[in-house]
Amino acid sequence: MDTKSNTEPLAPVTFDEFAPTSYETWKAAAIESLKGGIFEKKLFTKTLEGIVLSPIYTEAEAAPYKERLSFPGAPDYLRGTKTAGYAEEPWKIAQEVETHDPKEANKVLLEELNKGTNAVNFDAEAVELNTLGDVETLLDGVQLQYAPLSVYAGATALPLLSAIAKRQAKVGDEAPLTGCIGADPLGEAVKKGGFDSSFECYMDQMALTLKYAKNHAPELKTIFVQSSVYHNGGANAIQEAAAALATGLCYIDAMMDRGYTVDEAAERIRFNFCLGPNFFMEIAKLRAVRVVWAQLMQAYGAGEKAQCIDVFAETSQFTTTLYDPYVNVLRATTQAFSGVVGGVAGMKVLPFDAAVRDSDSFSRRIARNIQVMMQEEFNLLSPVDPAGGSWYVETLTGQLGEAIWNQIQKIQAAGGMLEALRAGTIQAEIAATLADRFKRLATRQDRAVGSNMYPNMTEKPLEGTKTPKAQKAAGKALEGINCPMCAGKALEEGATLADIAASFADGKAEAITAILPHRWTEQYEALRKATEDYIEKTGDNVKVFLCNMGPIPQHKARADFSASFMEVAHFDVLRNNGFATPDEAVDAAVASGADVAIICSTDDTYPELVPPVAKGIKAKAPNMKVFLAGAPAPEFKASYDEAGVDEYIHVRANCLAILTNIQKGKGII
């Protein structure tokens, strides 16, 4: 057997057979394929951020940003703050515990830590932590030297930090606390509509937590800036990132006013960003904030450690849906993947039922295992900045970075984040973006599977309810409480966390315009629920009859479109295989007793079919609404209107408004 050919090296792969193609050549071919469509309108997409996405990216477009390409772990940290990326230190799996009873929360926490979660993360507002005993119950059996903390404490971290530090002392764990027990008073104020004490009072408490960390826990962060209040309010990527980074600057300025250096303040900050549905936008956002923060800290004169931003992330609550909730698993997976590619240091994945009910063991396991599988099965610990070098991602990162920088400058020019929130300008800008999001969803320019597109008509809602977060009891101020150590002693003697908080409060409340949380599909969900409640109450429903004209190939596409359009509101769609004549269609529509009839056929047949069908229905059933599937040709619209067509449904129609009007006509709302 001749094996010589098997041992010879393969010939090098070349692309010599393909002639180089210029952008102009590609563009000419694209224009030809559009067959009359306008190139600039069809192939360029404007995002919510105002960035226009090109249909193709070239080296020339990425060239202006090439000079920013750095090595991993090197300023300006575009490619990550670690030289070897996740191979050096994997991102922390920080699944959150929000069970209300401390004893039950402890069981959930231990289960999480035993099955893949490796950072202690609990919702300090959801778990009812009133006393030192509650904190001890929550952390019973938890070894914090092996699982760093990643806990958001609300407006002030001082009471919770004091309690956890005292718990460590009582169990004899002398290892310094690591991770983060952090506060974000600005975020809390805009979430709740104001401060309970003066901003300066919160900054004084923040300074005390910095002092404790400096003396007793050098690797502990005590400032935890949350972008979720902005993201869940509807902010786009630029608004979210700029608000969070400007908040960080506000805290640094306040700490410097209290005697800390920029490095001492900046090194105590952790940021938590939300991961939205635009995969590449989220990757670019995370990469951009590293660069912008490094540049900001350079301007402040900070050292390299302070320039390395500490970024955690969580999948989006804004994009979770009540209907078809299992699709949330897919949303969370792509969002988490963008976080990993973008280079987060830690992450929380929301359970798929988080918007519906208190999550159970099953939904928590699915959420946790998304991250575990990414680390253990998908080999995502190996690549360092896997998106680096992509002409698209590098260009988008550069564009986002410039826009975030400009937005921060705008905030700083207004007096900083605190003054911008007091003036309400940030709230107003985010409200405008939210309105744009809702408009895009209403017209189905943006699509939410299971909500405004492809609804599941056989779906039964998940059982269970969402337990509201507990209202914290007012505390009684104690004498002599002026540091975490003495606060810990008071807790041991029976004081509550509320007592500690009251001891530092100054009672100088201040109102601020709140940014309320939303979900992008909430309007469609309310629409569908109104129909379902009406069905349950009356046994009736909106009936939609499809006037399918001609054989199946002639009407099927628009019949399917119309059915899906109407089923978004859970209306009852009456289908058929088509009618040969207008009279047959009219008789069938009237006999059905439907509330709405939709004429479905082709543009070529509409001029002869629409007038007799519409007039016939209106003559025999004047109260029946007549719709036409498809946008009418301008030269025929007047005749269709005159014949009695009430509405036109097509890809640019406002689905939400049309379905809402049908509900009003039926008396559902």
Image: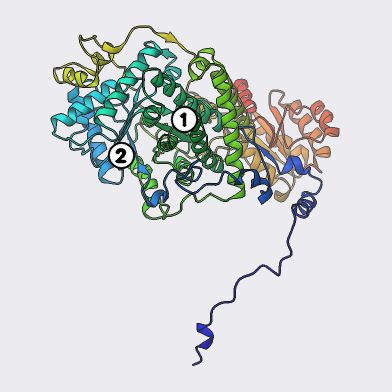
Asked if residue 291 lies left or right of residue 135, the reply is right
**Residue visible at 18% across and 16% down?**
495
Residue 100: horizontal and vertical position, in percent? Answer: 28, 27
Residue under circle 2?
Answer: 119
Asked if residue 6 lies left or right of residue 573, the reply is left
For the residue carrying disc 1, how many other residues have a C-alpha within 10 Å: few (<14), some (14-19), or many (20+)? some
Q: Earlier in the sequence, mark 1 or mark 2?
A: 2
For mark 2, give the secondary structure.
loop
For mark 1, give the secondary structure.
loop
Asked if 35 appears above or below 519 in the picture, the reply is below
Asked if 510 appears above or below 115 in the picture, the reply is above
**Residue visible at 43% across and 52% down?**
380
Residue 668 in view (yes/no): no
For the residue carrying disc 2, how many other residues have a C-alpha within 10 Å: few (<14), some (14-19), or many (20+)? many
Residue 477: horizontal and vertical position, in percent? Answer: 24, 9
Residue under circle 1?
Answer: 301
Asked if 577 appears above or below 232 in the picture, the reply is below
Q: Quadrant of residue 487?
A: top left
Total marks drawn? 2
